[in-house]
Image: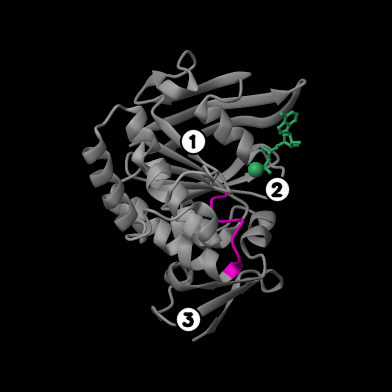
Amino acid sequence: MLDLADLTITFDGAPAVRGVDLRVADGDVLAVLGPSGCGKSTLLRAVAGLEPIAEGSVSWDGEDLAATPTHRRGFALMFQDGQLFDHLSVARNVGYAQRLRGLGRRAVRAEVEDLLELVGLAGHADRLPRTLSGGERQRVALARSLAARPRLLLLDEPLSALDTELRSRLAADLRRILTEAGTTAFLVTHDQGEAYAVADRVALMRAGRIVQEGPVAEVWADPVDSEAAAFLGDSRSFVGEAAARILAAAGLPPDPGASVVVRPASGGTLDHTP
Ligand code: ADP
Ligand code: MG
């Protein structure tokens, strides 16, 4: 279990993350949701050990990680743009961590095949990244992150570089993949749809602070204040898994083909178009 206690991070004395308390239980997916510049990436980088902490602590299973460097934390970090090695095939990109772990060729090949299957890219092993679509590249990046068998997967806006339709499809896939792999994950995003579709719990972040945290449906149904309500209700359209979760949160019957539009002016009313 990841445990952040009273975590504060400052740049030249100015706090970017202020007194954050958060927990991620084993197997859970937590999304920190907040506008650009509120401190999400800084928070994630601190968890990874890439940002010095001014106050508070990052712990795993009760052990303070202050003295544990990034590469010994057992965490994997995945960014918006995936950052694949362009000159290596899909299989070699995904197998990178296993080769580092010293696994034999055959074992690497078998693991890579399983991971490509999991992310829906079976048969793409020998392709080069530049021959793939943006969505396929993100899947490769995800497979590569999972290959390291991280005890915690850190995701910084993993789908933001993709267009809207692909994003909402891949968000549902991402949830399935994380759930099937039993991965504990900590996602940060400014995109409500991404948070709803992927996470079990959501924490709303504003100006460096967590203002509300809870199960996705609870936070959506009962925002802590009008600013949170307005942010959650940013007029956007949700489809697929994200739409299903919003309908459930609002106590409406499931409707597989539905798209849901949330409008801020009406205080979180749902427009529901099958
Ligand atoms: P988000 O990921 O939510 O968009 P960031 O964590 O990137 O936000 O940034 C939070 C705040 O910290 C911003 O005001 C940003 O300018 C500042 N910041 C981030 N990284 C640095 C840095 N290395 N040096 C100085 N200020 C930084
Ligand atoms: Mg960021």
Q: Tell me the SS state at disc 1.
A: strand
Residue 91 within the segment the image draws in magenta:
no
- Disc 3/disc 2 C-alpha distance (Å): 29 Å
Q: Nearer the viewer, residue 179 or 2?
A: 179
Identify the residue at horizontal 49%, vertical 16% (top origin).
66
Q: Tell me the SS state at disc 3.
A: loop
The answer to whether 256 is drawn above or below residue 23 in the figure is: below
Residue where numbered disc 3 is placed: 258
Evaluate whether residue 61 shows in this view: yes
Q: Nearer the viewer, residue 18 or 191?
A: 191
Q: Nearer the viewer, residue 98 or 212?
A: 98
Residue where numbered disc 1 is placed: 22
Q: Is mark 2 within 8 Å of ligand 1?
A: yes
- Disc 1/disc 3 C-alpha distance (Å): 33 Å
Q: Is mark 1 within 8 Å of ligand 1?
A: no
The answer to whether 243 is drawn above or below residue 191 in the figure is: below
Q: Tell me the SS state at disc 2.
A: loop
Residue 219 horizontal/vertical position (percent)? 51, 56
| Nearest to N terminus: mark 1 or mark 3 | 1
Residues in magenta, as a range: 157-164
